[in-house]
Image (cartoon, rainbow, N blue to C red):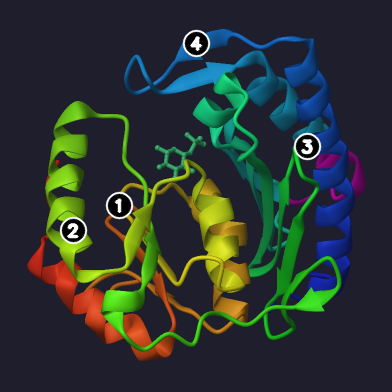
Amino acid sequence: MSRSAPAPTELLEIAVDVAREAADTAYRMRAEGVSVAATKSTVTDVVTAADRAVERQVLDALAKLRPDDAVLGEEYGAGEGAGSGVRWIVDPIDGTVNYLYGIPYCAVSLAAEVDGEVVAGVVRNLYTGEEWTATAGGGAWRDGRRLRCSTETDLGQTLVATGFGYDSARRAHQARVVAGLIPHVRDIRRQGAASLDLCLAAEGRVDAYYEKGLAAWDLAAGGLVAAEAGLRVTGLGGRPAGPDLVIAAPPALFALLHDRLVALDASGGP
Ligand code: LIP
């Protein structure tokens, strides 16, 4: 642990204050009207002026509060900081397509890493105000209530959240994977924001989640919330959760879902 790093609870307080301000900005900008400012990896991988403005607001706030910290954001990339050992990871609007269409399932996601380990995180639905928080070892919480994941043990009764990438070849592979999975589970939910999917899994509003292609900013805060609520959050085959695959499942379901996803080559494809 870095000598100068504050306690996770102190970092969480900063994250919550900054995320609330950012969510207010995102909501206000949506109400004023939103349009596509640019596209990234494909023509459906959109960015709005709000994505950029909200991330700028977060980065400016953190620079004032913690000037020596490093940052990593979806829109402005990495900033090295001055060796504090703390790195902030921000997705200014997770669920950008939902945001563009006015679907109320999008969030500000902000996490703090100390020496490479995520120790604090907040995910705030910018429409509903639902706010999930977690600190490493301190549990996962929503609006003051401690969260515990699903206790489901039967894969056939499992509600599974997932998502798809922006590249058409990857989507074709992901469609084959979900087609192979759906006969073996209760149902699938594709809601469009990984950070929120992970938080819903943290409180059993879905039983499990998996997705290929997540970036660090999609995963950092929601992954801590899910893990602190009792879910196993990993990749496949003992690898850590990351772009190849993220699976978040309760211990009683993990092996059943993991092995089914391995058989379906869920971490493979383009
Ligand atoms: C989104 C993820 C979601 C995934 C979408 C998209 P974005 O992030 O949160 O899980 O399925 O394709 O990547 O692009 O809205 O920040």
Instruction: Give the numbered dot on residue 58.
Output: 3
Spatial CA distance of label 3 from label 4 is 20 Å
Is residue 197 magenta-colored?
no
Read off the magenta span: 61-69
Q: Badge 2, how many Cα within 10 Å: few under 14, some, many 20+?
A: many
> Is 156 on the left-hand or right-hand side of 112?
left
Residue at the spot of label 1? 212
Which callout, 4 or 1, points at the residue further toward the start of the chain?
Answer: 4
Instruction: Give the numbered dot on residue 38.
Output: 4
Residue at the spot of label 2? 266
Instruction: Give amino acid for label 3.
Output: Val
Under tag 2, what secondary structure?
Answer: loop
Residue 167, image quadrant: top left
Q: Nearer the viewer, residue 193 or 72?
A: 193
Under tag 3, what secondary structure?
Answer: helix
Asked if disc 2 and disc 1 are in contact, CB closer than 8 Å, the reply is yes
